[in-house]
Image (cartoon, rainbow, N blue to C red):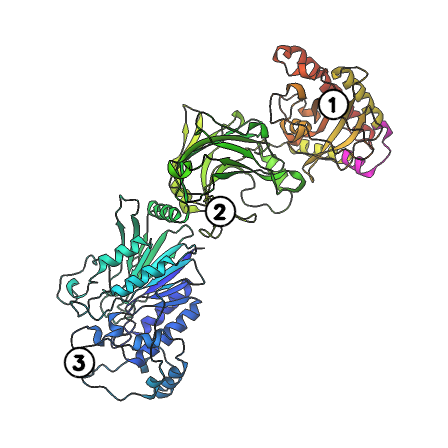
Amino acid sequence: MAIRIAHLSDIHFGKRFNLALWEAVKEQIVDFDPHLVIVSGDVVDDPYPAQLLAAKCELRELAAQANAKLVVVPGNHDVFSNGVNTPLTRRIDWFERIFFNDDTAAAEDALAVEYGETPGFKERYLPAASPLRGFRSLLSFRRRPNPPFESLIPGDGSQETVQRPGNCSAVLAMLDSNHPGQPIGFATGMVHVDDLVRLRGDLKNVRDTYLVRIAVVHHHLLPIAFTSGRLVGAEPLMVLHNAGTVLALLAEHRFDLVLHGHKHVAQYARLDLSPRDETGYPVAVVSAGSCALNTQDNTRGNCFNLLTISDNGRISVESLYFGGGRSPSRDDAEHNISYREPLVTTKRRAYTRSRERHSLHCRERLQDFEITETGDTRIKATLIGLKTAALGHPECRDHSMSLPRDSWFVDELLALDERLTTQGVGLTAREAEQANGDRGPGSQRFTISFPPGELMSRGISYAVSYASANSVNMSHWECEERAGPGPRAEGWDKGYVGIVVTHPIERLTITLKLPQSLSGIALALDCLCPKGYPDYKIDAAGDATFQGDASWSGDVEITDHERGNLHFDPVRGVWKAVIDSPMVGYDYRIAWRTPDVPLDKPVKADVLHQRRVLLDALDAEADNAPAMASFAVLARDLVHLFGQGGRAERHCVELFVYDSLKVALRPVLSVRSWSTMPMRKDFAIPLGRGIAGLAFQQGRIIPWAAASAESPFVKPIRYPWGEGDDEVEMRTMLSIPIFHPSRVNEERPPPWACVGVVSFGSSSDATIVPRLLDPAWATEAMEKLLGGRILAHACVDEILKSLDGVQP
């Protein structure tokens, strides 16, 4: 979730404060809807308890209106009279007693009685502009009598140095830069060494995940550019004396952002300590100007910041300038200034943060994809320099492959590449994890095991190949069928391959080889961010894990940044994307719009009608004797044409019709040589699966023989034999798609022109089907297949005529 921050500083509620400007500032902040309202000091001009209590009430009300958490640190004006630290003054503790105590209600009530109005930034609460009063306060020689409300203010107060807001994924460090024992006083600052020691200890206890670490301090840690060299306001009298020590500590603990004020000038700067060292870390240092001072002639005399930390951690700052009779507005492009850090910096920070969290990291990963003409996917994952920094790390890790509906993992193709695999690395397949019900597993996992100690001492390199069948939609029609008639999710008509990055990787390379039928599509690199990033779990092996209901959404910024890295490699004939320091938890995809085939609406309407007639006949369980008689003749002819003909052979012939509601082929008619029982009505072959499903999807006749099956991607669907069934294993099969008459003679008609499939199966290995797969028998095979296609189409025509006189 993105984090929005309203950063105010140097409000100086006092003699120069402008109530009208403040009301305009409040309106802009509430409209911004921030998670945090951060005030980096100098809330008041002088630390009088009445003004401090009024300021607390005002800022608390602002945070309530914005539904935000209020965060405040003191500035020099909040703890020293007139903001000046000299040997004659002392630090006044009203700020801590008021702002760092929740129980000030009694004092607020008493103050309201004394002033006749509830506390807040109001005219009545502004101090009198008396130089003598300020001089007396400065010297601290005389004190006025205590009003009643002061006795009701708690005696002490403190706030936690490190805080974790409940409404956003941030860690806050609150720094007090007003240590009284400074070598040079006046308006300079210093964070006490004890506070730094305490901060270091508290940060070690921060174990939760978070998107950003923010430090808040009053004095500026870096010189403010473009300011004059005048004595008043000059750097020697305003600096933070130990800024270097503070910055080093913040960089060491991977702080992303420092917010400060003090100089009344807005500035955005990036600091990178030890940029060439692995421990270096980029820190953004942002200052805010004064917030609501009278600036009669300066339309840029006031400024506050609105910051957005994107879901990916990118920092953006809007500095709203106003004054001289002009109120702040986010629409004022002429005066406002916006800053957005480079995404290279965001990525580097995310990579360094992930190295902190994960014990596992990898120098390089290559993910090679190849899609076949039948929508199958081959994958090779190569990991180079995989290493762990954790003692007792498991000597293994899991890989996972997501499987779309109706696809399946090809077990025969799971293998280690011995040429690229360190000796002693092992591979074990695991049971598929069900997520698609009866439509196939949702994912397949397998485990890579390592030689003892190698992963920590020298690191491991290995390569593993695997594949899935029927995993890519090859046409727009397929996307529509699988999406269904109801509301469709975003990207329902897109195909993609990709990888979820589960541990820090220095470089990720994704390649994709496409079949000829997809050669003309436009490809793009998509980068998706997991919901709740970076709040993901890490398993014992050091990999990010996501629950079954995890979701990813597109990160427009990272996608735009990385898309230029996708290129076509003409030498290898592959698309290639190279990504440095990919974001852990992100899903990186090469995606495309599935190509569409021009639709012949009259033909499609005819085919839908024909399917419905055949399926209605099945569902109605009517007596279709003429249709059955015609189909029995076809079964006899196909057995004669393709079968063995021996007495021991058992064969079956089925007419499957495509049902869009089930996205599957259903058996309408069947003939089995060993039984008079028809096929079960609840049996269905998913689109693209089995021999029949593939023939329908591909629009071509597909022969298959168990003894000579060359492609591991083509496998028959096992029939669910029931009680009383004589189970028979089909050793050879042949499926013939049935098309609309106007499309029969096309080389590969589209699926929307296909009514269904006629399938032949035999228990014998000695049928003619294996020879149909032999290239040397191509001429004879073509004649046989053409004869079978003519017989099948003629039979289905007769059946359609017999069912209510429908003409094909």
Judged by depth in the image, the label closer to the viewer, 3 or 2, is 2
Residue count near mark 2 (Cα–Cα under 10 Å), binned few <14, some 14–19, many ≥20: few
Would you say residue 343 is visible in this rendering? yes
Residue 516 in percent (x, y) is at 52, 25
Q: Quadrant of the N terminus?
A: bottom left
Residue located beneath label 1 in the image: 760
Residue count near mark 3 (Cα–Cα under 10 Å), binned few <14, some 14–19, many ≥20: some
Q: CA distance from mark 1 to mark 3?
A: 106 Å
For image coordinates 59% across by 38% down, the residue present is: 404
Residue located beneath label 3 in the image: 139
As displayed, is residue 776 above or below residue 170?
above
Residue 639 in percent (x, y) is at 77, 18
Q: Nearer the viewer, residue 730 or 800?
A: 730
Q: Nearer the viewer, residue 361 or 327?
A: 361
Q: Nearer the viewer, residue 391 or 263?
A: 391
Residue 766 in percent (x, y) is at 72, 15
Amino acid at pointer 1? Phe
- Tag 3 near tag 2, CB within 8 Å: no
Residue 773 part of the magenta segment: no
For image coordinates 27% across by 69% down, the residue present is: 75
As displayed, is residue 617 above or below residue 763?
below
Amino acid at pointer 3? Leu
For image coordinates 43% across by 24% down, the residue present is: 572
Q: Quadrant of the C terminus?
A: top right
